[in-house]
Image: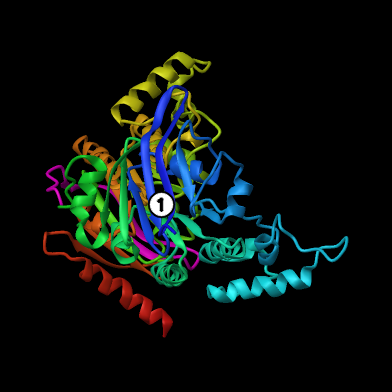
Amino acid sequence: MSENILEMKHITKSFFGVNVLKDTQLTVKKGQVHILLGENGAGKSTLIKILSGAYAREEGTVVFDGEELPQMPPGDVIKKGISVIYQEFNLVPEMSVYENIFLGKEYSNGIKVDHKREIKEAKEYMDRIGLDVNPKTLISRISVAKKQLVEIAKAISNDVKLLVLDEPTAAITDKETEMLFEIIRELKSQGIGIIYISHRMSELFEIGDVCTVMRDGEYVGTVNIKDTTEDELTEMMVGRKVSFEKIENKNIDREDVVLSVKDLGYKDLVKNVSFELHRGEILGFAGLVGAGRTETAKTIIGDYKKDRGTVLYKGKEIGTNLSENIKNGIVYLSEDRKDEGLILMHSVAENIALPNLDKLCRPFLNRRKERKTAREYVDSLKIKTFSELTDAKNLSGGNQQKVVIAKWLYSDADVYIFDEPTRGIDVGARDEIYNIMYELIKKKASIIMISSDLVEVLKMSDRVAVMGGGELRAILDNDGELTQQDILKIELAEEVKDEK
């Protein structure tokens, strides 16, 4: 019997006449963690949706556990032993944990659902992966990390042979990530094949065995993780070398304070935060989850109503009117692009136009100008989309992020607050977003960048503000001597203090 659990060969798929997969392939062994790597828009999600039955392939074959699979609906694919856990969980919030695990395959004792049996078996699956919650707890009441474990319990209940994890650590903490890795290692030891999709390079080397790289819908190559490096994988992904070194910023005017925040407070989430932002500067905000970085940003722009303190913009105090602050030139790019950054059911052009209607209405909306403007940003930001009329929901994560950036670039703001600007997107798209940020400061804009990625913080920031427990603990000069350890020491010291 073959040691391969999955063989996908010569897979081809197109949308609206545009090839998104071109003769690509993927082979996964039993008991192997197989990394699937590629830029946003490389075709990873499309390949997985073909595997899951969500999309129909145009050409190619799929052999699973020695059997060639015909085209079949997702429900039949799950019965074969293939489970996919997407970034957006497939759970019903107002149903319990055990009901979600057995959704669509309920036990009955005659005409009624056998809840007692489902709860008992759900607890057994939950115990296998260390999910310590009451099976009767509603999904809406548990954390993101626990929702992920519910998805894994669901997969195990389907006698899973191949588990696909799509960006599983994008919204969980480092401790929760390590717990997830332990579960993955346990599943691997049971002979379950795992396809792992992530843009966090450090994770790939910690959890992966082999890595398949895709670019522009095509298969680039497969390498053993232990025989490669981060630089080599990056070059395979993007077709060029990507630098992680800090570029000297010659655009800072340290005499010109654009934004001055003094003793800012919001409930117990932001505590007496004070700092200055100079013209042409990138000020990085680092900190652990719950440190208060996002809350500080939202209080500055007026999305949260401050309890105390002042915000001076160009020497004048600004209030808590969000729309007024945006109009004056302070904009916030949310970490949650799908819920707060975009209207997914609207087109690229409509999303770019939304905060800029005053420029497009004379007095009625000029649709021609709206489309022309959107096309210009699609071209200049290299947004991969069929057209500017494509709905935002159909774009990859990196391209959705570029649409968010485009709408605020068109607003011609003065201060940009980027909250986790590259979360969930690949190194190639990251590099393009970094270039956009550099272009902004060349034009004398100023940037506050909130990021949990310390490599990113050190690459982009001129100074680093370190937060913990809602307080600003230190502002450090990124002078070439600053290290991740220096920042972590301040972050972790606060965590230890909190635990005590």
Q: Residue at x 46, y 49 (%)?
A: 336
Q: Position of residue 392 (x, y in %)?
A: 48, 34
Camera-nearest residue between 479 and 300 = 479
Tag 1: amino acid? Ile
Query: Would you say the magenta stretch is mainly helix, strand or loop?
Result: strand
> Where does residue 14 sit, x and y in percent of width and height?
44, 28
The quarter of the image holding the C terminus is bottom left
Which quadrant of the view contains residue 310?
bottom left
Count of number-bearing discs: 1
Tell whether 438 sits left or right of 400. left
Front position in the image: 5 or 75 = 5
User: Is 202 one of the magenta-colored residues?
Assistant: no
**Residue 481 placed where, x, y %?**
11, 64
Quadrant in the picture for the N terminus: bottom left
Q: Which residue is mark 1?
A: 300
Q: State the residue at coordinates (71%, 58%).
A: 105
Tell me if 362 is positioned left or right of 383 in this view.
right
x and y, in percent, of residue 116 in the image: 77, 73
Horizontal side of residue 254 vs 76, given as left or right: left
The answer to which of 245 and 239 lies nearer the viewer is: 239
Q: Secondary structure at mark 1?
A: helix
Compared to residue 114, the image places residue 364 above or below, namely above
Q: Which residues are magenta?
A: 246-275
Q: Is residue 131 among the parts visible in the rendering?
A: yes
